[in-house]
Image (tube, rainbow, N blue to C red):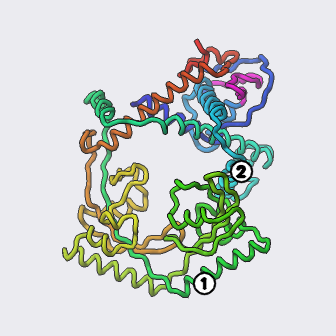
């Protein structure tokens, strides 16, 4: 388990802004770096050249230096990571990408450009200006920065899609989970941190018809402007209240399985290429959608979200309703779960008595050290069964609502128990099986792929059999 965790941590560290575009340069000899030493011990460098090849991809000696540089520029630590280890990670990435192309996994330039603009928008927002971003990543100019970032994103997408294809095929049975658990020595059983189960009742302020119509009229105005030549993307950047898509002009790529609300998907898939929808309502507010491209079962679209203004009177009314519900629960006139089923405005939780589902584990338990900080601050001081006072909650779209929260169950830190912690144990067992599947995949693909490691790097001790010994 410790080895697995160390490997995953290292892989995550390396999956940063560090994979550079490859250039074929004839290998040359000069002062040799010591690839088996940590980077901090390597003060002298080999003249740049091809140090390894995987299929159609070359890796340069400078790619290792660039990767170390990118990690440290983002505050990551490279202490103890050798050039051999870094080369091993780059070799893995290239094999994933090479095999993704062989398996006809497609990552389009439009998809990469969209992701690139999203990332650049975020970087500019954090650093203040594009020239500061270029300087931060030590690039000569914006064009070089964009070229490198494009190649990095494309490589990462190919790698991710190939990894997903491998692990998605892995399934695990209850008997395999049981066998996995039985094989763990008693003194090595994992310890799970303190957890809690939480439920909530949501009261959403009522919006007046006048405010709704104001938003609908504004969206119709946007549609008319675009039809007369204005940019939909610019409108989205300036006016949309969907913070997640604003940096890339309201853009989303989706298919029938993409987890968007039904109303949004119904409209998106009813439009033809180049069409703009009429304003329509979802739980998030009012939208218009512009379909840019239809690609088989996938749709490239942009949207603008506007939420109607909520009056102070409506907010006050919602708070008073929440306070009345709380009083009934405290006086034991109704249970929290029954009140959630009859009074809560949140469709996702009201049917199961307001119980929240952990989005990371799809379980109802939240580990305290990994909880969303906002949620933790709201429930950490509640005793089991205690109901919070009405708390105002601001959604990502900017909509305000009131919540009542309660802790339905507290679970102390404990050693893994098969019956109580089955879902977590199943997750650990599945991860182990996925790692085994990836290791087997590497063994098979390295044998059938052209791989060459040059010079002093042939003395490296790799986890995978890159030297084909």
The percent position of residue 38, horizontal first and vertical second, equals: 59, 26
Q: Where is 374 relative to 172, above or below?
A: below
The percent position of residue 292, horizontal first and vertical second, equals: 70, 60
- In the rendered image, which residue does mark 1 sit on? 214
Q: What is the span of residues highlighted in magenta in the rendered image?
A: 40-62
Does any portion of residue 231 appear in the rendered image? yes
Q: Quadrant of the image for the C terminus?
A: top right
Q: Is residue 55 magenta?
A: yes
On residue 109, the disc is none
Q: Where is 239 relative to 57, above or below?
A: below
Q: Is residue 242 left or right of residue 150?
A: left
Q: Residues within 10 Å of mark 2 (few under 14, many from 20)?
A: few
Q: Is residue 453 left or right of residue 346?
A: right
Q: Is residue 282 magenta?
A: no
Q: Quadrant of the image for the N terminus?
A: top left
Q: What residue appears at the point 36 percent right and 60 percent down from the top-left corner?
A: 356
- In the rendered image, which residue does mark 2 sit on? 110
- Cβ–Cβ below 8 Å for labels 2 and 1? no
The percent position of residue 14, horizontal first and vertical second, equals: 58, 36
């Amino acid at each position: 388990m410790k080895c697995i965790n160390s490997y995953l941590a290292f892989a995550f560290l390396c999956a940063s802004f560090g994979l550079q575009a490859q250039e074929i340069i004839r290998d040359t000899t000069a002062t040799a770096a010591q690839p088996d030493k940590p980077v901090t011990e390597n003060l002298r460098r080999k003249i740049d050249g091809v140090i390894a090849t995987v299929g159609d991809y070359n890796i340069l000696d400078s790619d290792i230096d660039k990767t170390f540089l990118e990690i440290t520029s983002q505050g990551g630590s490279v202490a103890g990571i050798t050039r051999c280890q870094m080369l091993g990670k780059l070799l893995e990435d290239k094999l994933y990408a090479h095999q993704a192309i062989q398996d006809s996994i497609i990552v389009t330039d439009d998809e990469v450009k969209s992701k690139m603009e999203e990332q650049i928008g975020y970087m500019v927002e954090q650093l203040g200006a594009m020239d500061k971003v270029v300087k931060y990543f030590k690039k000569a100019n914006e064009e070089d920065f964009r070229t490198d970032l494009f190649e990095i994103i494309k490589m990462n997408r190919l790698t991710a899609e190939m990894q997903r294809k491998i692990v998605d095929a892995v399934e695990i049975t209850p008997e395999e989970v049981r066998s996995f658990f039985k094989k763990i020595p008693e003194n090595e059983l994992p310890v799970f941190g303190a957890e809690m189960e939480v439920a909530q009742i949501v009261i959403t302020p009522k919006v007046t018809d006048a405010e709704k119509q104001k938003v609908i009229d504004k969206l119709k105005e946007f549609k008319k402007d675009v039809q007369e030549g204005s940019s939909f993307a610019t409108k989205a950047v300036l006016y949309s209240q969907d913070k997640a898509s604003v940096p890339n002009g309201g853009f989303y790529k989706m298919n029938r399985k993409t987890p968007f609300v039904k109303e949004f998907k119904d409209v998106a898939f009813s439009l033809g290429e180049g069409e703009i929808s009429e304003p329509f309502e979802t739980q998030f507010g009012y939208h218009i959608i512009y379909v840019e491209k239809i690609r088989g079962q996938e749709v490239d679209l942009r949207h603008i979200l506007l939420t109607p203004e909520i009056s102070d009177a409506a907010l006050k009314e919602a708070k008073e309703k929440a306070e009345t519900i709380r009083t009934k629960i405290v006086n034991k006139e109704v249970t929290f779960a029954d009140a959630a089923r009859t009074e809560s405005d949140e469709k996702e939780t009201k049917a199961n008595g307001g119980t929240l589902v952990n989005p990371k584990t799809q379980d109802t338990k939240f580990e305290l050290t990994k909880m969303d900080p906002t949620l933790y601050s709201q429930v950490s001081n509640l005793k089991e069964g205690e109901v919070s006072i009405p708390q105002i909650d601001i959604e990502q779209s900017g909509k305000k609502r009131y919540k009542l929260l309660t802790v339905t169950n507290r679970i102390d830190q404990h050693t893994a128990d098969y019956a109580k912690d089955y879902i977590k144990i199943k997750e650990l067992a599945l991860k182990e099986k996925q790692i085994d599947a990836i290791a087997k995949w590497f063994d098979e693909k390295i044998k059938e792929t052209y791989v060459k490691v040059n010079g002093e790097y042939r003395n490296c001790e790799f986890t995978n059999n890159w030297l084909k010994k």
